[in-house]
Amino acid sequence: MEIWQSAAVVTGAASGLGAETARHLAEQGARVSVVDIDAERLHPLAEAIGAKAIPCDVSDSAATKAAMENARQAHGPARVMVHCVGRGHTQTLMDEDGPMSLTSFRELVEVNLISTFNMMRLAAADMAALPPLADGERGVIVTTASVSAYEGQSGEAAYAASKGGVVSMILPAARELGPLGIRVVGIAPGLFGTATLFNIQRDLNPRVTRQIPFPHRLGDPSEFASMVVHVIKNVMVNGSVLRLDGAYHR
Ligand SMILES: NC(=O)c1ccc[n+]([C@@H]2O[C@H](COP(=O)([O-])OP(=O)(O)OC[C@H]3O[C@@H](n4cnc5c(N)ncnc54)[C@H](O)[C@@H]3O)[C@@H](O)[C@H]2O)c1
C-alpha cells in the first residue's frame, strides 16, 4: 500500500518504537494520528511531526473507541493501524511475600493483549467500510509482540503470556480479514533501546548484547519503524509474525 496520503493511527506513540514509527510514516506523507496515555510526551511529538495527538488509555475500551472516532474525524478512516502500546513486566510467580498479584497480571493482559484485540477489531471495522484500492487492498494492521512470546525468561511468565496471545491472533485474523483486503501482521522485537526494555532489565549490560549473534547491540527504534514501512508497502506480507532480533534466542 502507498503510504503517501494514507490515514494512519499509531498507538504507544509518545515513546520508543511507536514514536519512531509515527515519525517515519509522517515523513512518508501519511496523515498520522498518534495515541498514547502519556499526553505530556505525546503533544510535542505530534507537533514535531505534524500529527494529530489523541491522549488515551487503551485499556479503557470506551476511551479507545472515542480515540478512533477522533482520529477518523481528523483524517478519515485509517488504512494503516500500528499498535505499539505495551508494558514490560518482570516478576516471579511467587516470592517470599507470596504469589504474584493476580490484579497486576490482569492489568498487564489488559494493556498488552486485550488492547491489541480491541484496536484490531475497531481498525478492521473502519477499514472494511473503505473502498478497496486498485489491487483490492483496504488496509493493514501491524501489532507488536515480542520474542518473549516464544522464549520468555524466568520471571516473564505474565509478560510472555500477554505477548503469546498477540502472536496467536495474527494468523486467524489475517485469514478472516483477507477476503476484505485487510492484512494483519505482527512484529516480534528482540532487544531495542527503549524505556520498556530498561524497565524490564534495569541491569542491562554489554554481556547481554554480546549474546545477540549479530549485530551485537540493541536494536534502534528506526529499524523497527523501517520494518513497519516495508510491511505496509509489501502486500505479500500477511498473517505472519516477523522476528526482528538479530537472531537473538534467549
Ligand atoms: N524495547 C524492546 O526491547 C521491546 C522488545 C519486545 C517487545 N517490545 C514491545 O514493543 C512495544 C513498544 O514498546 P517500546 O519499547 O517502544 O516501549 P516504550 O515504553 O518506549 O513505549 C510504550 C508506550 O506505550 C504507552 N502506553 C503504555 N500503557 C499504555 C496505555 N494503557 N494506553 C496508552 N498508551 C500506553 C507508554 O506511555 C509508552 O509511550 C511494546 O508493546 C513492547 O512490549 C519492546
Image (cartoon, rainbow, N blue to C red):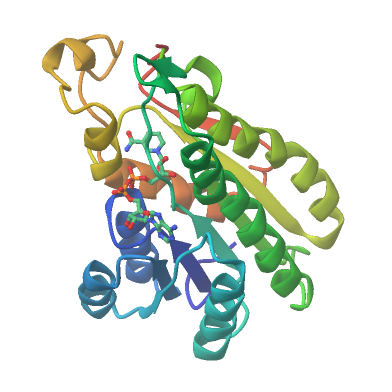
Q: Which residue shows up at 37% across the image and 65% down it?
A: 37
Q: Is residue 70 left or right of residue 207?
A: right
Which of the 4 image quadrants contains residue 46? bottom left
Front residue of 190 and 132: 190
Q: Residue at x 13, y 18 (%)?
A: 205
Viewer-proximal residue among 69 and 133: 69
Relative to residue 236, is residue 203 depicted above or below? above
Identity of the residue furthest to the front in this view: 97
Can residue 133 be seen here? Answer: no
How many badges with numbers are in the image? 0
Q: Is residue 124 visible?
A: yes
Question: From what the image shows, is residue 27 above or below residue 235?
Answer: below
Q: Position of residue 12 (x, y in %)?
A: 39, 58
Q: What residue is rendered at 57% in x and 41% in y? A: 186
Q: Position of residue 110 (x, y in %)?
A: 56, 49
Assign the C terminus to one quadrant of the image.
top left
Q: Residue 152: percent from the left, percent from the top? A: 47, 18
> 212 above or below 232?
above
Name the side, left or right, on which 249 lies relative to 141.
Answer: left
Q: Is residue 123 left or right of residue 176?
A: left
Please state which of residues 222 and 35 is positioned toward the viewer in this rendering. Answer: 35
Where 117 sits versus 78, above or below?
above
Q: Position of residue 156 (x, y in %)?
A: 44, 22
Quadrant assignment for the N terminus = bottom right
